[in-house]
Image (cartoon, rainbow, N blue to C red):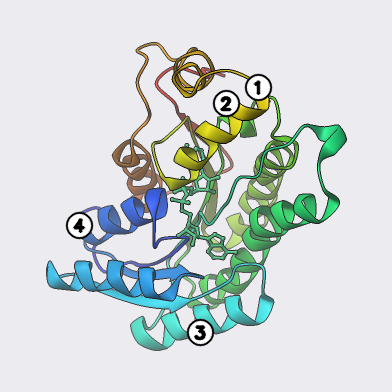
Amino acid sequence: MLMQDKVAIVTGAASGIGRGIALAFAREGAKVAIADMNLEGAEAVAKSIRDDGGQAIGVAMNVTSEEEVNSGVEKTVNEFGRVDVLVSNAGVQIVHPVHEFPFDQWKTMLAIHLDGAFLTTKACLKHMYGQGQGGSIIYIGSVHSKMASLLKAPYVTAKHGLIGLCRVVAKEGAAHGVRANVVCPGFVRTPLVDKQIPEQARELGITEEDVIKKIMLNETVDGEFTTVEDVAAACVFLGGHATNAFTGQSLIVSHGWCME
Ligand code: NAD
């Protein structure tokens, strides 16, 4: 058990990658707060963990709201007594070419990905520093933290930005034993990606099959999607590691799409 008795908060954990990370953490012995703006979905994931003998709670949290982030972190600490690991995972995707990108949608994207990462980090650091036993902050970036694609200006901008936030948290957190990392997945077949396939096909004037083969998986070494389990394994490794050895770094999980 790599995370025995650690307390973890995973945002956006009602679905997809976050859900997979929460389930993997629970299997490794962690007590997990499933934080999501979809409370019903969060409660369902928490219940499935409890039904399997683990400990988990659902927490209502829109990561763009400082009030909801703070109260969600407080609820977790009230329930489990502390917080050791934060996975800042909540995210959405909106695609348009830059010259047509609606400004309100640009701001929504940056608020969820960057404000959300900042607010959850700030709220958890307060506890991690106070507890005096270190901690782990993991940002779910993307291959788009390292490279660009058509139509994804705010997503690519925000995912690159997480690398900067991670490096600052790694430097500031070091004195308190708090480490920070970015996990950068390639395409994972989740609702977020399923929504993009027809959108990209329409925007680029190609078939959905070609979006998958020629855009999403073309550069992988094996033509395979990255899986939720691939990403969760990287988070268990980083969240469960005891020292600062890996702090500040990003780990790309993309079936060879990006080897930077
Ligand atoms: P998903 O749509 O399956 O799940 C996203 C979850 O985030 C949902 O439960 C949703 O309710 C929640 N959420 C959205 N906005 C929120 C907000 N403001 N506050 C709280 N919760 C909110 O998506 P996913 O594919 O699992 O994506 C999770 C993360 O992984 C995102 O940050 C995404 O950018 C990143 N990512 C995904 C892929 C991929 O291919 N799926 C690849 C690289 C990175």
Name the N-terminal-most of marks 4 and 3.
4
Q: Which residue is mark 2?
A: 201
In this rendering, would 25 be left or right of 207? left
Q: Nearer the viewer, residue 34 or 15?
A: 15
Q: Is residue 50 above or below residue 93?
A: below
Task: Please provide percent x and percent y for residue 78.
Answer: 41, 88
Q: Say which of marks 2 and 4 sits in front.
A: 2
Q: Residues within 10 Å of mark 2 (few under 14, many from 20)?
A: some
Q: Is residue 174 above or below residue 200?
A: below
* Element type where label 2 sits in the image: helix
Q: Residues within 10 Å of mark 4 (few under 14, many from 20)?
A: some
Name the N-terminal-most of marks 4 and 1.
4
Q: Which residue is mark 1?
A: 204
Q: Which residue is mark 3?
A: 74
Q: Nearer the viewer, residue 39 or 120?
A: 39
> Gap between marks 2 and 3, in whole Å?
43 Å
Q: Residue at the location (29% across, 40% down)? A: 229
Q: Which residue is mark 4?
A: 27
> Gap between marks 4 and 3, in whole Å?
24 Å
- Whether residue 246 appears in this view of the structure is no
